[in-house]
Amino acid sequence: MRLFVRFLPDPMDLNKKHQMESIQLGISIAISGLASKPERDLLMKDFMMVETVSFPKTGSPTTPAHKFNEFKFKTYAPIAFRHFRALFGIKTDDYLLSVGSTQNHLVELTNPGASGSVFYLTHDDQFIIKTVQPKEAEFLLKLLPQYYMNLRQNPRTLLPKFFGQYCYICGGKNIRLIIMNNLLPSTIKMHQKYDLKGSTYKRKASSHERSKTSPTFKDLDFMEHHKEGLILEPAIYDELMKTIASDLRVLESFKIMDFSLLVGVHNLTLAQDSNGPPIEPMSIENLKETDSWRAIPAKNSKGENLLLFMGIIDILQSYRFKKKLEHTFKSMIHDGDSISVHKPSYYCKRFQEFMGTRVLRPAPS
Amino acid sequence: MRLFVRFLPDPMDLNKKHQMESIQLGISIAISGLASKPERDLLMKDFMMVETVSFPKTGSPTTPAHKFNEFKFKTYAPIAFRHFRALFGIKTDDYLLSVGSTQNHLVELTNPGASGSVFYLTHDDQFIIKTVQPKEAEFLLKLLPQYYMNLRQNPRTLLPKFFGQYCYICGGKNIRLIIMNNLLPSTIKMHQKYDLKGSTYKRKASSHERSKTSPTFKDLDFMEHHKEGLILEPAIYDELMKTIASDLRVLESFKIMDFSLLVGVHNLTLAQDSNGPPIEPMSIENLKETDSWRAIPAKNSKGENLLLFMGIIDILQSYRFKKKLEHTFKSMIHDGDSISVHKPSYYCKRFQEFMGTRVLRPAPS
């Protein structure tokens, strides 16, 4: 009996599993439904569209029968996100298979931040599904026109790649989700990982974090590990800093702060000993206007060859939405220049300076 | 004495002249002021910016002394319009010289529409300054993000090229202005001109209009003059209709109606006899993605070679703003299918059909 009981799935887990499968079903129907809408130029009104589909247990003309609890599924700005996916080079079939197929289970990630979000990774390592707060979901929708403008003008942007936004509604419960790119592919060993904000105030990984196999370090740790920063070819450095400057103008214009630069460092010199697949570094000669920053060649102070994977994360916190929190933080400010919660313009300026002088440096040319 | 009096300028005219020169001064200061703002990616917030400058008679640190009445000058979305001018290939110095130099007088045009707007042409024939109603000015500002999106995705757009939006304020009087392209260059003889809406209801030029040297005809006149339409190379026809379809999606999405296609027909066969400068027709082979439609080669039913100059005009009338007017019109509808004031979606559909079948036709291939 005991054995039998042990093999019965935990009812909580089963609920969660069904919930995730319902979400995948919702996404698959949303994506399939788009096929009937021909490609056309994106319009402002596309950013404001919301589609709601009901999923009765017995099925409907547009939805299959299912074994889960009945639910509704909202798709935000479906045409706009399709447009974004196309700009990011994501094929609809691949997206459908990765995100929307209940055959392909999602893996829950341990939460790297303290935001209360839950992260799921698709089986193929391509996409991250993140649960977000109502305020964050609302904010992303407001950001979309600006996000589009940035994609058009700054196609190599380091901002998160947003592929879709949804809401799963079941029994009075709303789970808001966004689908993003996975910055740090798990097939590539990251010898070091950093979450950098450009602040030095309490920016040290906890001892709990350090005890992990692949800890995410913070600003002070970085400065200790890489006193001379990460050294880039001057041409790459210049282009990358241009991208960051454009991204920061966008973030500042929407009063966004508390975001981080996530940096994964793959050490090619150390990796030579292991037998992983070879990774193609991007080269400045072949860098196209529309290429994303990925596998950026760099060196550390020992002269070891590195590949950097980086992106700006956690951009859905707007200063406008957190005045109250801000006041709390202000009351505990010790050092106006080194606390990471401050006015957005200051935050962005400091971020840019830190990344451009402490984290990334041009090799002497 | 009598002679002397006759040479004194009419005080009304002088007022108007001073007013126009004040406006030119306002524009020149607005444009010069932009030089200190470096080029950067356009942001959403740029669409909402308004700059106001006071012009005291005695001058100020940023404005010269002048002989006109004191005035204020508002510049709307200065960075956004600079971005548009760059996309349209307008150099700042040229714009400044054409529009903002009081040395270069503006020519008032006889008003082709019944909108109550006044039109001025710059001395070099390049730009049109149009006075607009408060509602129209407000509407253009709301349209700007969508307008930007269209420029990016549909760069050959036939929509008006907007180069700037301003407001001259003097003694409680507000004159709102927009600067646009001049669709029909006066150096090129237009053998025929049409204002087409896709409607046949009362769409005939008045006898007063017909008596002019260069009358603007309407839909019914066009159908009489060109029973077989204007014949285009099939490849040009297809591209042009794609442009029109994209433009109409934009107009419909903003519930815009009552706009027209302005078509100027230059007859090359007739023009051979005269001695004007030769005009380079655009060719489908050399047509670049970013080229504007201009001097489009066509033929009439007699086989004469034509060059077409066309654009969609009067797009600042939104259905949302004219419900009342709409009801008035509805009361006098005789034929739901042939009155030009109707629901925007119907208006756009009929417009597209009329232009694609009655006005423009592909040559048999």
Image (tube, coloured by chain):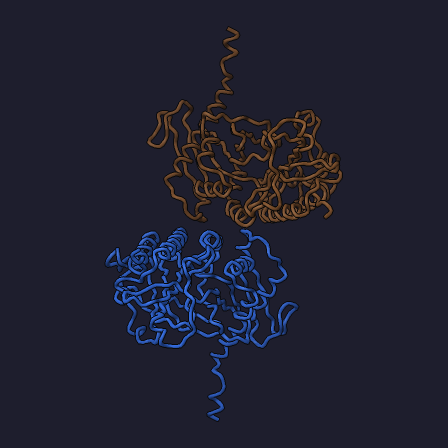
Chain colours: A brown, B blue
Image coordinates for residue A242, horizontal then vertical, percent: 63, 49
Q: Is residue A304 visible?
A: yes
Image coordinates for residue A146, horizontal then vertical, percent: 53, 48
Is B115 placed above or below A278 here?
Answer: below
The count of marks equals 0
Image coordinates for residue A38, horizontal then vertical, percent: 38, 43
Q: Nearer the viewer, residue A273 or B214?
A: A273
Classify residue B278 as left or right of residue B304.
right
| Residue shown at the point (69%, 32%) measured from the top left | A269
Image coordinates for residue B38, horizontal then vertical, percent: 62, 58
Q: Nearer the viewer, residue B331 or A224?
A: A224
| Residue shown at the point (52%, 70%) measured from the top left | B98
Is A211 placed above or below A347 here?
Answer: above
| Residue shown at the point (56%, 44%) measured from the top left | A291
Residue A108, by quadrant, is top right
Classify residue A90 as left or right of residue B59.
left
| Residue shown at the point (41%, 75%) measured from the top left | B276
Question: Which residue appears farthest toward the bottom when viewing the image?
Answer: B1
Q: Is residue A350 visible?
A: no
Residue B259, by quadrant, is bottom left
Is A318 placed above or below B7 here?
Answer: above
Question: Which residue appears farthest toward the top when viewing the image?
Answer: A1
Q: Nearer the viewer, residue A253 or A155?
A: A155
Classify residue A239 as left or right of residue B349.
right
Q: Nearer the viewer, residue B15 or B235?
A: B235
